[in-house]
Amino acid sequence: MSSYTIGVDFGTLSGRAVVVRVSDGAEVGAAVHEYTHGVIERTLPATGQQLRPDWALQDPNDYLDVLRTAVPEALEAAGIDPADVVGIATDFTACTVLPTLADGTPLRDVLPERPHAYPKLWKHHAAQPQADRITDLAHERGEPWIARYGGRISSEWQFAKALQVLEEDPEVYARTERWIEAADWIIWQLCGRETRNACTAGYKGIFQGGQYPDKAYLEALNPAFADFAETRLAHPLSALGERAGGLTERAAAWTGLPAGIAVAVGNVDAHVTSPAAQAITPGQMLAVMGTSTCHIMNGETIAPVPGICGVVDGGILAGLYGYEAGQSGVGDIFGWFVEHGVPPEVHEQARAAGLSVHDFLSRQAAGQPAGGHGLIALDWHNGNRSVLVDHHLSGVIVGQTLATRPFEIYKALIEATAFGTRTIIESFEKAGVPVTEFVAAGGLKRNTLVMQIYADVLRRPISVATSDQAPALGSAIHAAVAAGAYPDVATAAATMGRVEKAVFEPDPAAADVYDRLFAEYSVLHDYFGRGENKVLHRLRDLRNEALG
């Protein structure tokens, strides 16, 4: 008899569930649930309180609604007997982290009027001052773990966000009994027991060499922070693909699945995608391209790559060192421009053509030769994750004239994100970590203009993950391993994963132009990003002062 697993992918704005056949990886049913509260960036729903700039919160009840709605709907779409489902696994955007009580109750449910009681989404960047102090102190003290993170700790990660809570709302910090990634919290809700996965602990929680940063270091940051790791984080770590427990009766009622089936250990959306795209061999760089982009790659050794998000033993696949880098804004940048920078007449033209504004602008931009708009942009509208690790940087567009048209700016923004990816790849290769293949997954792989520009800028063929729901498929692969259907993730990936090789080939003439544009990008990148001119930081400070 056929057996199936469920993969649930918790994204920035929605959660999606996919039903996957274990024998061959076929996706037989899927459903999406949009979060009711989405990203809470301006106003706290419970009180109407205005949030400060750079905040990004969520409501954990939205995550539970995905289990209650998307999973049953995916089962119905698949038309299978729920009794044939043998396991469920999930993945999450990271670092999305929340404070809870000892039993897993979110503090948002206890203190709904306090912003710091809510989950902080990955793109919450208000902890940049804390991140800078964490980095500076690590270098002053010669902490060995700082090299594993490219020399800098991000404001997106666990320690910076927790230190911000302590210093801005000590009462919420004092009430926090567990500080936990949403990737692990959702597993707690499914199987009824707390687990911690090796992936988020390593990349987002500064867990290296079997331990978190020591008490003396944390005390030097803030005396009240000394016991943070041992009281709020400490827990045995579980390997990826391991069984976290069995589905509880309560979670079975939510999902319509049989109680007791395998629940896999939590994982991150980008890292779980590697087996779905069959991108697990050292040298295969996977770019999961959506609102942001994560660049994931396995290696056989550890190398100090500047500005990476981390290198973790077993962080992607057991037996290999997993590297992560990324860009904090990609699809978000394109969406921002369409929403705020495109005039109404272009929206009307797109409607008349039966196209989305994105597709309409892409069609116009595709007809223009590389370099034809006379523009260059920096892709820092949401800060820089790699290689500068500075979320107080902001976007720049150079070369605009009164003749510049919307599709030209749109194309320049796409090119900027491709230049950012090239910067990351070159950093890997200069550090002695070769990139032998580039594989794309995520929603942006469907935009042929984006993919062709990336191929031209990188001067590399681009392979493409076959699945449109690759993170959810990756979770389903891990669920199959947790259920005992395969001995390990690599074996399951060979059967259940899918990839189309070299779908986009670079155009030599366009690549020559992009080499010249990338040289200009690199000059601006270093001028604005490496301290020669700190105008972007000064503008951010001035804005914050003006807003109080």
Image (cartoon, helix red, strand yellow):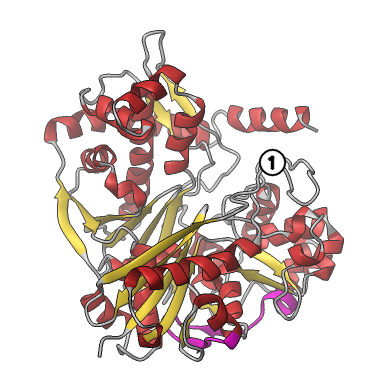
Q: Position of residue 201 (x, y in %)?
A: 55, 72
Return the residue at label 1.
42
Q: Amino acid at mark 1?
A: Arg
Residue 391 in percent (x, y) is at: 58, 44
Give the residue at x 69% y 39%.
Answer: 53
Residue 318 can be seen, yes or no = no
Queried whether the magenta region covers residue 87, the answer comes back as no
Residue, far right: 171
Closer to the camera, 459 or 353?
A: 353
Above or below — where is 345 with respect to 181? above
Q: Is residue 299 left or right of residue 334?
A: left
**Residue at 19 percent of width and 34 percent of height:** 511
- In this rendering, the answer to whether 97 lies above or below 357 is below
Q: Is residue 240 magenta?
A: yes
Q: Is residue 397 left or right of residue 220?
A: left
- Residue 60: percent from left, percent from top: 64, 63
Quarter of the image where the C terminus is located: top right
Q: Is residue 466 above or below residue 235?
A: above
The quadrant the N terminus occupies is bottom left
Q: Is residue 241 above or below residue 439?
A: below
Instruction: Answer with the quarter of the image where residue 452 lies.
Output: top left
Task: Identify the residue at horizontal 75%, vertical 63% (top origin).
Answer: 108
Q: Is residue 81 left or right of residue 223?
A: left
Say which of 423 and 185 sits in front: 185
Which portion, as a residue range, is magenta?
229-249
Horizontal and vertical percent position of residue 331: 42, 42
Dividing the picture into quadrants, the one containing residue 466 is bottom left
**Numbered disc 1: secondary structure:** loop
In the rendered view, does 266 fall on the left or right side of 97?
left
Q: Nearer the viewer, residue 137 or 548?
A: 548
Residue 521 in view of the camera: yes
Q: Residues within 10 Å of mark 1 (few under 14, many from 20)?
A: some
